[in-house]
Amino acid sequence: MNRPDAPLILLFGHSGQLGWELRRTLATLGDIVTAGVDGAERYLDLTDAHALDVLVHELRPTLMVNATAYTAVDKAESDETLAYQINAEAVGRMGKLGAEMDIPVLHFSTDYVFSGKSKHPWKENDPPDPQSVYGKSKLAGEQALLGSRADSLILRTAWVYGARGSNFLLTMLRLFAEKKQLGVVDDQFGAPTWSRLLAEATAQLLAQCKTPEGGFTFGVHHGQVFHLTAAGEASWHEFAQAILDMSKEECVLDAISTEQYPTPAARPAYSVLDTGSLHEAFGVRLPHWRQGLALCMEELFDRQ
Ligand SMILES: NC(=O)c1ccc[n+]([C@@H]2O[C@H](COP(=O)([O-])OP(=O)(O)OC[C@H]3O[C@@H](n4cnc5c(N)ncnc54)[C@H](OP(=O)(O)O)[C@@H]3O)[C@@H](O)[C@H]2O)c1
């Protein structure tokens, strides 16, 4: 059903929180072909480098968009090899193919590349210092892509949630229904970001990267990293309270410390990203996290 004259966008990670939304928001920019393990149009396990090569050579897409990741942050601590295969090696491979075949690559990364030890929103060129295997593997992915010399752009985001998948919003809604009282961490800060708005902003950005010949290029922004999250900041406790307030559930939320909720992987304490550069470069920015949450909750609860 693909149109012969439309750009072909090869989307990796279509079944994830972000990829599911990108499949929709990028549809106006070209014909999308999904590649992945779970229900994709083209089966692809990213740990199979040869299969990735074969697929990209066969399809010769106009653009590759990578929304995959090994996102099980705690599990990654004991599953380093797989985390690196997906978050670093596969991304480097995409870059190599992109450079060889002149296919731009848009990739997503994370606030976990930073230590979280600052009290100011992180800027793109602040020194990375990941504290977990997940963060280290994602940083290695950034470096592999940027080192490939493909026409690439990286969007670092944070605290992603949505109406699907495994995320804080859905976990809280389940727990509110099960428990009368809940402790939620109050000393980690970030900007809760709805996957839908992230995907819409990505489409806005890519629309500006179209060439007159019908392709895509990141042009002067090639090889750059940008931060893209909702505006504002919250602790997990504050975010949970906002979810509770917008839901019909009743629960008492106690503010607890990171020490009281130990996890195998260290979380950055301060994860707020400065999104000013992206706004300056592309005029794109997301609304305050409370606005995004209200829209997402409307979608979850006001469906006919
Ligand atoms: N979630 C967050 O809070 C957050 C925060 C900061 C940055 N990010 C970044 O944002 C991007 C999207 O994250 P997300 O939350 O949408 O992730 P997600 O919901 O966990 O989805 C990950 C996607 O990767 C795919 N995938 C994993 N292993 C694969 C493999 N071996 N071969 C092919 N596909 C594979 C998954 O496919 P299956 O469904 O088949 O497993 C899924 O489609 C990632 O780059 C992530 O690092 C996320």
Image (tube, rainbow, N blue to C red):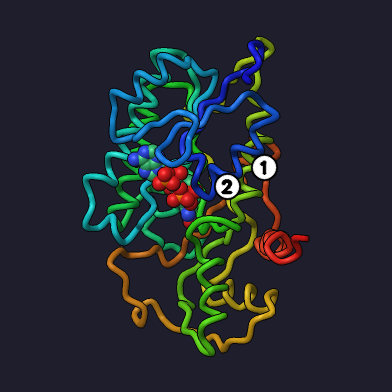
72 up-or-down from 235: above or below: above
Residue found 33% across the figure and 53% down from its top: 130
Q: Mark 1 or mark 2: which is in front? A: 1
Nearer the observer, 72 or 39: 39
Position of residue 166 relative to residue 234, above or below, is: above
Q: Earlier in the sequence, mark 1 or mark 2?
A: 1
Ligand 1 within 8 Å of disc 1? The answer is no
Residue placed most toward the observer, 36 or 219: 36
Tell me the amino acid under the disc marked 1. Glu
For label 1, the SS is helix
**In this view, 202 is above or below 208:** below
Q: Which residue is mark 1?
A: 200
**Residue 109 in sight:** no
Residue 287 image offset from top left, x and y in percent: 70, 55
Q: Position of residue 302 (x, y in %)?
A: 76, 64
**Cα separation between marks 1 and 2:** 11 Å
